[in-house]
Image: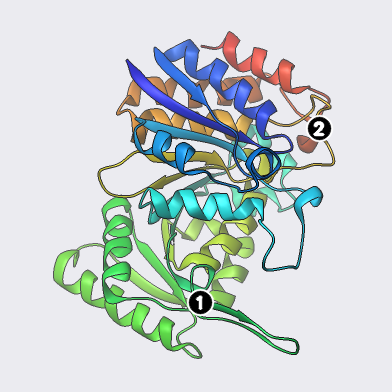
Amino acid sequence: MTRIVALPGDGIGPEVTAAGLQVLAAVASVEVEQHVFGGAAIDAHGIALTDEVLAAARGADAVLLGAVGGPKWDTTDPSKPRPEQGLLGVRKGLGLFANLRPVRAIPALYSASPLREERIAGTDLLVVRELTGGIYFGAKERSADSASDLCVYSVGEIERIARIAFGAARRSVTSVDKANVLETSRLWREVVARVHAEEFPDVPLEHVLVDNAAMALVSAPSRFDVIVTENMFGDILSDEAAMITGSIGMLPSASLGGDGPGLFEPVHGSAPDIAGQGIANPLAMFLSVALLLRHGLGSEVEAAAVESAVDRALEEGLRTRDLGGEASTAQATAAVLAHL
């Protein structure tokens, strides 16, 4: 039996996870094991990720994550646990170095985007974000009057994420950095260029500074096929790209590594302001389930069925509140299930 570990987390995480597991059960026979994670784990165990939960995740075929965080656990005290430590810990513990965030402009939602239809039409891009290096994982220091975060990248880390990006390309790869200022970015650009020349010379490659990439994402997003970039830049750019779809509630992600299980989660946060009201948009979770089926279980037909069901429900008028409608989480789930 295929084993899935579910980490619902905080805020709307449990709501969208429950909905996602309904969709998963409609297309696949799986055994699901749920564990507390993030802020919920801090409340229960004093730590965001326990050794037991990490061990369970390592033994699974795939991990489905809801969301973590909320004002209850916000603190500037570096000695206090934070829910986000669980997220970073599970990524590191599973060796998940590549985060894939597909961004597709769905015709039924063109009007939901703050960008004009002619700008977003035809957009179908993939952000490949390096996930376990850079400033998020570098050494951190804090004194009474200063603080520092160390940004470090190795040649090996850059090589492996570049290979993922080139392997995923259909048309081209855009490598995003800040090589005019940062030494890590200069190394990034050199290594990506070498991997391109030695291993993927037939895939067109361009180098773009991160500020220019941010502008191009809102002015001409359809020019991009695969964007590959470091951890922090990828975090920011992929959230920006969510506006192409009309809502961050539409963006799924897959975090992949070596031989172990992948982790699949919607890009949106825990949205504590709407938690418990039954109005969260579950569509990003459904699309994350599709990525779990495709990349985690090798079930392409079932993955395509879930994506098609989401598209058809939207074409028939399904709109949650973030998309300008009134559909509840349960109604959105029922609409997608009806097409499965």
User: Residue at position x 72%, y 34% from top?
Assistant: 12
Identify the residue position indicated by label 1 in the image: 139
User: Residue at position x 64%, y 58% from top?
Assistant: 240
Q: Earlier in the sequence, mark 1 or mark 2?
A: 1
User: Residue at position x 38%, y 56% from top?
Assistant: 97
User: Residue at position x 20%, y 63% from top?
Assistant: 202
> Of tags 1 and 2, which is closer to the observer?
1
Identify the residue position indicated by label 2 in the image: 321
- Residue 56: give x, y in percent of width and height: 41, 33
Q: Mark 1 and mark 2: span between their CA atoms?
A: 41 Å
- Residue 60: give x, y in percent of width and height: 36, 31
- Residue 292: give x, y in percent of width and height: 42, 32
Left or right of residue 151, residue 140 in this image = right
Quadrant of the snapshot with the N terminus: top left
Residue nearer the viewer, 194 or 173: 194
Q: Can residue 88 be seen by looking at this rendering?
A: yes
Q: Residue 44 is drawn in which quadrant?
A: top right
Q: Can residue 125 be seen by looking at this rendering?
A: no
